[in-house]
Image (cartoon, grey):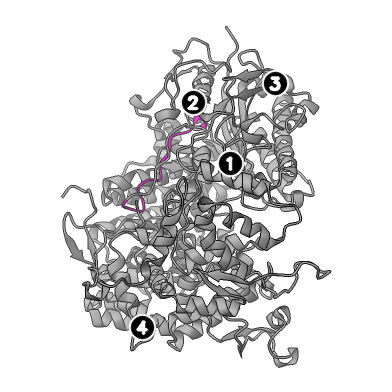
Amino acid sequence: MRLWARHVLGPICAVACTACSGLIGDTEPGPLEPLALPPPIMVKSSAPRTLSNTEYRKALSSLLGYPVPASLFAGWTETLTYSGFDGVLWSGLSGKATQDRITTVDALLDGVVASPRVMLCEPDDVSGEACAGRILQRFASRAFRRPLGETELAELAALYREGFSLAQGRVPSARDQFHEGLRVAIAAILLSPQLMVRVEPPPAEGERDLGAFELATRLAFFMTGTLPDDELWLAAESGALVEVEVLRAHAMRLLFTRTADFVDTFAGQLFDFRQLATAGAGTLAHEFYRESAAVMSEIVTRELPASSLVAPGFTYLSGTLAAHYGIGPPSYAFMNDDMLRFETSERGGILQQGSVLSLTSTTTKTSPTRRGRWVQGRLLCKTIPPPGPELLEQITSVSANIPADATVKQRVDAHRKAGPACAGCHQYMDPIGLGLEAFDMLGKTRAFYDQAATLPVETDSELLGQPFTTFQELNGLLAKMPDVNTCLAEKLVIHGLGQMPVEGDEGLIAALSAPVDGHDPSFADLVERLVTSTPFRRIASTPGAQP
Amino acid sequence: MSRPNRRDVLRWGGVALSLPLLPSLAPRVGSAARPPSKTRFIGCFFPSGAAMPDGAHGDWTLNGALAPIVDRGLAENVAVLRGFRAVEDVDVHWSGTAAFMSCNRVGRYQGSSLVGERCGKTFDQYIADLQPTKLRSLNVGWGHLSGWDEGHDSIVSIQYVNSIAWRDERNPIANTRDPQALFTRVFGDGSTIADPHIAYLLDRKQSILDGVLDQLGRFRASLPADEVAKMDAYESGIRDVERELVARREANVCSGDATIDDDVEVYIATLKTMQNIIVRAFECDAARSATVMYHEGIGDTTLGTATVGKQHDCAHNDWEQLRRINRIQVTLWADFIAQLKASSLLEQTVVVLGSNMSDGRSHRSANIPMLVASAGNELRLGEEVVATTAFDNPAMNRNLADVYVDLFKLYGVDRPVFGEGQWQSTGVPSGVLAPT
């Protein structure tokens, strides 16, 4: 079993579901808890990871020195995700993935030799081979995220020569032939598994420290979703990055100077709003993305408690969004498509953002169950186990007996009241979702389901036995739960270490989420604690592997 | 650097050299009782079943969902299978999809996030092995799911719902969903090898792939043993592209064109166009194996305006809509059969259509919708093939693997054991073959 018991809301499938209610309460300390030692922090093994589509696109962009258009990736098969995060699960390099990569790299080759970031020299200055060697050494080492050995350099030089020879008599000038040689070698680098797959070789037994280049790679992908930048690379080359203070300084530098990248790669995946980043400028979907990113950026840069994302008390609105939500300054206050900060308790919370509200709905209706499941999975780190066949039979019979004219609340309640097997899960999903019914599929507030105002929205519900009537009250209850805080820490671990949570991670998560001066930690606190922790800087041997 | 010149090997040695096949893995071809009569195969799939209450035949009859087959005069080309079960190793959306054409167990996550994504080499891929063609296989579909929820995703890979074709037990085959990409793969991009610049670019691409393969070899050596199989797929993918390069060099490309369907519904136009391209690829013998997923294995992506509601949700809650969706998908399949028949390909081809469950409300794995189409007299076409009268009981159902064992025989392949665990073939004829 991968997930430890805290996560799973009980084995509901064939038994009465009292286990669920027992587990949900286990975050409350028992009488003997204060005397207990903190759980140990476990160093994890490391498995190879394929770069996600987004990581690969960003890696190509940083290698080539210009943004590679997302359109070149339009036909790619999407990367698999776990809890929103790319690359936690293996995304295979199947036949189609291979063809897609070859086609995309092919389309990029013309522009490669025009990039100043690539072309460190021209054959006018030095001999063609010497210049090519210089270019390829830098390009491949940055792509492979480590220094290259002599053999590898010789092979790249040979590839250059092969391309150069192939071009003889087939492309016009000596300079073109030089460029063709480079294109062959660079394409081979861009298609190399050493770029596409991140490997941290495990020790035969026990544990080992990660090297400076491995740390640079971990930190860069964690914080920015791409290859190490120049500053990080220099710190790796000098070896200084293995010093924990240097590592900490670079983490903070990236957090505060590349905040948008961190927000996009961490919060954007966790809360799904990165999916809207590529929506057309000016579309509602893109405005939703901008709102979510802007709110999260302020929480990061002002070092507010990370858990304040539930109810930060402000949001960012464009003119389009203000009109859509029906709040905020009058339209003349907006210049162009700039976003304005607006203090409000109605919006800004992660569960009041158009991004999350629309992404957890279908185009035709909201689903309290789906929204509740999302909140449990993404904000509270509680896993709803899949229903088994017997439970599905029961769900079928309950659904069949719901009157056609039942209200949304009555429909939802029917499942919760249909016996312990159904209630076992629905009690953790539906009440939360009902509290968000005041927002429609596009995140607009509503008091009625129908235009004739005959079907009122009912949001009175309860969260773990605590009643609420409005979403603001729901936010208040969520914000007080320790689960939001520990869940954010856990998600950061999943993203930073690229693995699903396993038994033994409790110690790290507890250490990350511990209060700072009596307050919930900020993202800066969380990031700092994670990157300086031993699980971030060390790896263990693979369980079951022969030493 | 000393390196064998694969370019020349491929050019002069032919594609067979790039397709090593271990003898122990090779099926026994030609030793079957029947002489091979079939050479091509298409596996088709839709998710979430049909309006089949508690696994009864329900709407899945010639008067119901299958009416488009009758309307096109194809009932005599189709066998309707009853009483066969999907692999229910975990939620049947997952295992019933991934194992639809291998009948293998699906792996679960344990320990490392990589362990567990495995199923089995699928029937279509065995057929693709029989005769190397320019394109190994064409695998198309609608929809893709990157994740489901933490409950499912922490146990089994969402990848299981995205592919019915698996190259081997560790490597599912992703579908092409863009008709333009499929078109380019089959017919090329309009450039001609007679153009010296195009010929040069093909040579350049070969050099690049040689370089990648060299790096792959070294990289593989640095991987833990368990991960090496994963890189095999990348190498296989490169070999496939090489094979296509060789075909282009030899001007061995499909000429002609395929009809771009202009149905106002994007869903229908997309699937029909891809089916048209597959038929043309079969006609010019660019491929002999294909799969079509009319929807990913859950049915959670939108089908456009053709339907109201998602297929998965309709299977649970709205059977009126489900019937409409089933009819659209069966119509697509019937049109596919009609095209193959009109192109005189149906006699050499077996086409199946199946699902991962019957009654979607309870995810019932018994009595899954399953059709087999062809022409000729080797199969019990035009009949119902009833495996058991207890068709609604998964425990009493027959294994789909028995059907595949019988179908193998039509290709001259003697593979008496197929599938795995309790879903493995039983050695008892499925009943789909006509008596000899």
Circle 3 is placed at which residue position?
B77
Tag in front: 2 or 1:
1
Distance from Cα at disc 2 to Cα at disc 1: 23 Å
- In the picture, measured across the screen, residue A180 lies left or right of residue B76, that is left
Label 4: chain letter: A
User: What secondary structure is found at the residue carrying circle 2?
Assistant: helix
Distance from Cα at disc 3 to Cα at disc 1: 31 Å
**Which mark, by number, is residue B401?**
2
| Amino acid identity at mark 1 | Ser
| Amino acid identity at mark 4 | Met
Q: Earlier in the sequence, mark 3 or mark 1?
A: 3
Question: From where the camera sits, is residue A282 visible?
Answer: yes
Tag in front: 4 or 1:
1
- In the picture, measured across the screen, residue A181 lies left or right of residue A130, that is right
The residue at the far right in this view is A452
Q: Residues within 10 Å of mark 4 (few under 14, many from 20)?
A: some
Q: Residues within 10 Å of mark 1 (few under 14, many from 20)?
A: many
**Image marks 3 and 2: residues in contact by CB distance under 8 Å:** no
Please tell me which residue is depicted at 27% across the width and 66% down the height of the picture.
Answer: A147
Distance from Cα at disc 4 to Cα at disc 2: 57 Å
Distance from Cα at disc 4 to Cα at disc 1: 51 Å
**Residue A124, percent from left and from top:** 40, 73
Circle 1 is placed at which residue position?
B362
Q: Are marks 2 and 1 on the same chain?
A: yes
Question: From where the camera sits, is residue A106 visible?
Answer: no
Distance from Cα at disc 3 to Cα at disc 2: 22 Å
Q: Are marks 4 and 1 on the same chain?
A: no
Circle 4 is placed at which residue position?
A252
Tag in front: 3 or 1:
1
Label 2: chain letter: B
Magenta region:
B111-124
